[in-house]
């Protein structure tokens, strides 16, 4: 069990109906102090009201920290820019799961464990074929990941640390295979088995784009870009899908069911579908000469049109992930010679305007990670329908780390938000013939 690391930070006083209540304040290692309201209901017969829980800390965590005003994202204290530049996705997976960067021997062993668990049960192939051919890859992934507990029931006991670790490794290892199978099924290609001789991201690219008729060679520039996308999406504090995983896990649900719940939440267009929306917007604009019209509409408060892929709910400054992704995006476009395609001409001109136009700069509507990742994934050859599935692949390790942390938290309870009830007061039932 992990011990609480939050430190006392004084007290806050609440006065209500002539009575004064003292509430302890706590401080973490970064970020604002918080008021502990756990005893407020018992002491004052009051709840707090916070739709979306945007001002409420639901847990104590030492995995990820975000400062949206300063544009900071840290994994276990390490800036995302440094990890994206110098690390690999598997090394970041180890960091998120175990709290520290691995030593050389530890990374080698972890790499071996993950690589040698990438294959899935052969009967899963038959499970895939139960879906319609035109099923969305996220619908397929929800079903398949949720079904893993039926195939790997020897690692569903959440009270056994060894089974938790086995399940964690299995999920990190098998999620790219499942995502690649969903892609292949979606486009009508035969499944490609993983190769132990390839790295994590290289293996995934091969499973997605190889065909039996010819040998597939991994392009290192493309592999680096996709690996960076995975790193940048690996965790993002207590967002909607992570909170969903924790909420499902708080009931004692098995890890496969919890990750399936996270995938289902991520599928929502307001969450994981943002890069899809950004690319669809570029397709709607179509040509560079139409950009002024859409920019004008974006500035019009009375027009419902919004530029997708610009600004961020959390980052009030520049999204630190976008800076990293911009570099990889242009590297991929250079490698593939795609700067001159109509879609990418629109994207690059929109980027130029957003970085220079007074309106966008003043409102801090900078291009965010969804803008650049959508362009990059499209250039890599993925259809828009796969974008959120790739997001789920990357985020799985973050969900697992958060799930493990929750189970080891001595203060964790089953999630049970309260409400303000505004319905009818108590009343008596009236028989149907007297109504």
Image (tube, rainbow, N blue to C red):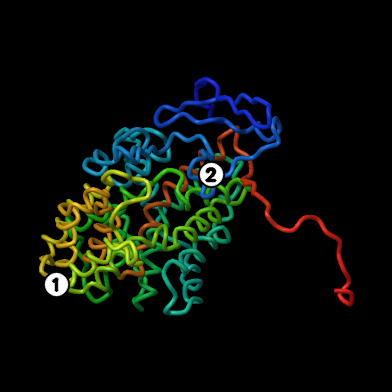
Q: Which residue is mark 2?
A: 164
Q: Is residue 321 left or right of residue 127?
A: left
Q: Which residue is mark 1?
A: 289
Q: Is residue 175 left or right of residue 230?
A: right
Q: Is residue 224 visible?
A: no
Q: Position of residue 158 (x, y in %)?
A: 59, 45
Which residue occupies the foreground of this view, 50 or 146? 50
Q: Is residue 233 visible?
A: yes
Q: Position of residue 248 (x, y in %)?
A: 58, 51
Q: Is residue 408 left or right of residue 210?
A: right
Mark in front: 2 vs 1:
1
Which residue occupies the foreground of this view, 406 or 168? 406
Q: Is residue 251 left or right of residue 115?
A: right
User: Measuring 46% from the left and 29% from the top, which residue is drawn there?
Assistant: 33
Q: CA distance from mark 2 to mark 1?
A: 55 Å
Q: Position of residue 220 (x, y in %)?
A: 18, 55
Badge 2 element: helix
Displayed quadrant of residue 309:
bottom left
User: Measuring 51% from the left and 66% from the top, which residue is drawn there?
Assistant: 143
Displayed quadrant of residue 287:
bottom left
Within 10 Å of disc 2 (Cα), the crowding (few <14, some 14-19, many 20+) is many
Q: Position of residue 304 (x, y in %)?
A: 36, 67
């Amino acid at each position: 069990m992990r011990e609480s690391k939050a430190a006392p930070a004084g007290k806050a006083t609440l006065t209500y109906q002539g009575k004064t209540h003292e509430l302890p304040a706590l401080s973490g290692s970064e970020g604002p102090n918080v008021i502990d309201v756990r005893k407020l209901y018992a002491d004052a017969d009051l709840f707090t009201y916070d739709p979306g829980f945007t001002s409420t800390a639901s847990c104590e965590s030492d995995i990820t920290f975000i400062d949206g005003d300063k544009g900071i994202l840290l994994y276990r204290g390490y800036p995302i820019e440094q990890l994206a530049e110098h690390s690999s996705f598997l090394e970041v997976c180890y960091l998120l799961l175990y709290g520290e960067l691995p030593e050389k021997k530890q990374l080698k062993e972890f790499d071996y464990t993950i690589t040698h668990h990438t294959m899935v049960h052969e009967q899963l192939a038959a499970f895939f074929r139960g879906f319609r051919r035109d099923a969305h890859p996220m619908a397929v992934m929800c079903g398949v990941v949720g079904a893993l507990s039926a195939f790997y029931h020897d690692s569903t006991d959440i009270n056994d640390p060894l089974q938790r670790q086995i399940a964690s490794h299995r999920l990190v290892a098998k999620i790219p295979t499942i995502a690649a199978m969903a892609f292949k099924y979606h486009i009508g290609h035969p499944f490609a088995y993983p190769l132990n001789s390839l790295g994590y991201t290289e293996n995934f690219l091969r499973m997605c784009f190889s065909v039996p008729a010819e040998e597939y060679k991994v392009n290192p520039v493309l592999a680096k870009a996709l690996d960076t996308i995975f790193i940048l999406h690996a965790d993002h504090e207590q967002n909607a899908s992570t909170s969903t995983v924790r909420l499902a896990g708080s009931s004692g649900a098995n890890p496969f069911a919890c990750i399936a719940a996270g995938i289902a939440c991520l599928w929502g267009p307001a969450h994981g579908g943002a890069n899809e929306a950004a690319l669809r917007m570029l397709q709607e604009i179509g040509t560079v000469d139409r950009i002024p019209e859409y920019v004008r509409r974006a500035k019009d408060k009375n027009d419902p049109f919004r530029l997708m892929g610009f600004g961020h709910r959390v980052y009030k400054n520049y999204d630190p992930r976008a800076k990293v992704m911009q570099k990889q995006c242009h590297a991929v476009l250079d490698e593939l010679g795609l700067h001159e395609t109509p879609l990418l001409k629109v994207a690059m001109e929109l980027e130029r305007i957003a970085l220079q136009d007074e309106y966008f700069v003043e409102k801090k509507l900078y291009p965010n990670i969804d803008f650049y990742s959508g362009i990059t994934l499209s250039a890599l050859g993925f259809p828009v329908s796969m974008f959120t599935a790739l997001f789920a692949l990357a985020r799985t390790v973050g969900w697992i780390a958060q799930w493990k942390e929750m189970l080891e938290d001595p203060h964790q309870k089953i999630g049970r938000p309260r409400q303000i009830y505004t319905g009818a007061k108590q009343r008596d039932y009236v028989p149907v013939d007297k109504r």
